[in-house]
Amino acid sequence: MNRTIGFALVLALVTCALAGPAVAGNVGFRTGLSLDPDDFVAGIHFRTDPLAQNLHFVPSVEAGFGDVTMFAINGDLHFVFETSSKLAPYAGGGMTVNWFDTDGNNDTEVGGSILGGLLIGETSWGRMFFEMKLGLGDVPDAKLLVGWNLR
């Protein structure tokens, strides 16, 4: 991994760590699949308490392995729709910086995404979610993710 990407990943992790004390919220884990490139994806995220009514900032860092090696830094906004059940759908979008390594050829791309998901249940130790992201630009075409927001 070249120094620029290493610096970007360290910067993203420090940003997520510093955001915790400054903005209440929770940390979570995510895993799933990306399409084009076809990779297994795993990562961590920080979900803030609402910035405005039902609007959350969700920065994340992900690594993908498969067709190519990929590292992604994402900054997403989620709008959670109010419901009377324990299922809470959300929609949003965000920006992403992706670093790709294909057989020793490195490439960094910036793009965006639109997303939708479903928060499931609410326990004293967290909440599960399912999410689908559609990529805009030279980033993965889609990501199907499942994860957990810890309390």
Image (cartoon, helix red, strand yellow):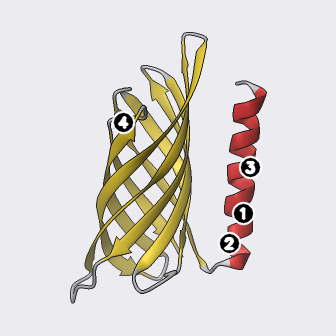
Where is residue 81 drawn, in percent x and y?
Answer: 28, 79
Q: Amino acid at mark 1?
A: Ala
Q: Quadrant of residue 19?
A: bottom right
Asked whether disc 3 touches disc 1, contact meaning CB atoms under 8 Å apart, the reply is: no
Asked which secondary structure carries label 4, the reply is: strand
* Closer to viewer: mark 3 or mark 2: 3
Q: Dividing the image into 4 quarters, which one contains the N terminus?
A: top right
CA distance separating discs 3 and 1 = 10 Å
> What crowding class fits label 2: few (fewer than 14 Cα within 10 Å), some (14-19), or many (20 or more)?
some
Where is residue 118 drawn, in percent x and y?
Answer: 28, 66
Q: Is residue 49 above or below residue 109?
A: below
Q: Amino acid at mark 4?
A: Ser
Q: Earlier in the sequence, mark 4 or mark 1?
A: 1
> What crowding class fits label 1: few (fewer than 14 Cα within 10 Å), some (14-19), or many (20 or more)?
few
Q: Earlier in the sequence, mark 3 or mark 1?
A: 3
Residue position for label 4: 34
Asked whether disc 2 touches disc 1, contact meaning CB atoms under 8 Å apart, the reply is: yes
CA distance separating discs 3 and 4 = 24 Å
Residue position for label 3: 11
CA distance separating discs 2 and 1 = 6 Å
In the figure, is residue 5 to the left or right of 62?
right
Residue toward you, 149 or 55: 55
Q: Amino acid at mark 2?
A: Gly
Which disc number belongs to residue 17? 1
> What crowding class fits label 4: few (fewer than 14 Cα within 10 Å), some (14-19), or many (20 or more)?
many
Q: Is residue 52 above or below residue 73?
A: below
Asked which secondary structure carries label 3, the reply is: helix
Where is residue 94 drawn, in percent x and y?
Answer: 45, 55
